[in-house]
Image: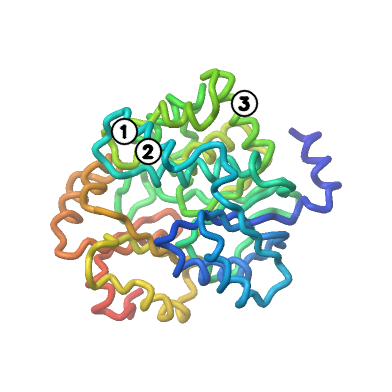
Amino acid sequence: ETQYLNVLQKNKDVSTMDVVIPVAIKDRIKLQQCLQGILKNSLTPINNVYIISNNENILKDLLNNNATDVKIIFISEAHFPFSKEDIKRVLDWKKSKYNHATWYYQQLLKFYIFRVIPDLFENVLILDSDFIFKQKVSFITDDGKAILAYGYPFKWILNTTKYPENVNHSHIDFAKRFVPMWKIINSFSGMQHHLLFQKRITESLFRYVETYHKKDFWKAFMDAVDIKKWNAASEYVIYFHFAVKNYPNDLELRHLNSYDFIYDSEEDGNDILQILDQFDQYNEYNAVGFHSFLNLKERLKTMDYITESLQINMLTEKSLCFILKLSNGTLEIINCSDFKKNNLDNY
């Protein structure tokens, strides 16, 4: 490990990263602000930004409004060795009752970046297109270590930092089936809508999986999916704990303060983007996310990482729209209606 770091430190690219943003059509209106946020607020120099999508027209507004020297490059989903239809066929064969092929598809797109996109830097920030950085943030230390966010706790217990060490969680179960000798290293998931992937760690993960299962990474991934859950896997959970377990000397971990709005995309009245401008006056957070879900109620019903009382409270709300506030590892959940009513005065 030390020898590898010494090599990296001599490499002029050690403190520079590429950025990869997969974009679903439903999130294209958020992409502009996502891109502006990372270009404006990354303290780590950015080489190129790659947009993964099935529609090149999504780049038109981005190119017209790009005031930086960073090149924005389109990567077609057609270049990947699997399609959304391939994922859907596997789920249909498993007799899944959920419409969640896209959920697994976008995770696999992220995993395969180093095998599909030519000439990527060693360090690549994977960024969800509905997550917007609002304050200055570094992603690589001066000596070349990746800075990873702890993300959300595995168990959603509110207003505390004392989380259980042993938890039942579908993402943990999946990772153990998928990656040999994988285990959780701490009480946090690593899920926070972004993660710095490093090429050699990602390739090591691929070798572990493909050697053990004797098949392509994406096929082994889909074999491991438990169809009883709406979201049975997380790319961030898999990578975060694999990296922390196997490459602890090459990483630094931190809490990243953020607000995340989660809402049902089919409900009327979820004018979430209108709230974004009001956030500029608040400086206690680093980022804000706006995450729409089809049939959020069904997803909430299968979440095994929230307490029963919290699940009941969320499901009985008139409007399925919530703000998740993550501050130094402490989680709060606020209903959007209450948030709007107070006009952010208390936050």
Residue kind at label 1, given as amino acid type? Asp
Residue kind at label 3, given as amino acid type? Arg
Q: Which residue is mark 2?
A: 88
Residue 42 sits above or below residue 164 on the image: below
Element under label 1? helix
User: Which picture quadrant has residue 338?
Assistant: bottom left
The residue shown at (56%, 41%) is 111
For marks 3 and 1, give the CA distance. 28 Å
For marks 2 and 3, give the CA distance. 25 Å
Q: Are marks 2 and 3 in contact (CB under 8 Å)?
A: no
Give the left or right position of residue 22, taking residue 336 as reference: right
The residue shown at (50%, 40%) is 108
For the residue pair 30 and 334, the one nearer the viewer reads as 30
Where's the C terminus, which quadrant? bottom left
Residue 341 sits above or below residue 315 on the image: below
Q: Residues within 10 Å of mark 2 (few under 14, many from 20)?
A: some
Q: Are marks 3 and 1 in contact (CB under 8 Å)?
A: no
Q: Which residue is mark 3?
A: 207
Q: List x then y, in percent, for residue 300.
A: 24, 48
Q: Are marks 1 and 2 in contact (CB under 8 Å)?
A: yes
For marks 1 and 2, give the CA distance. 6 Å
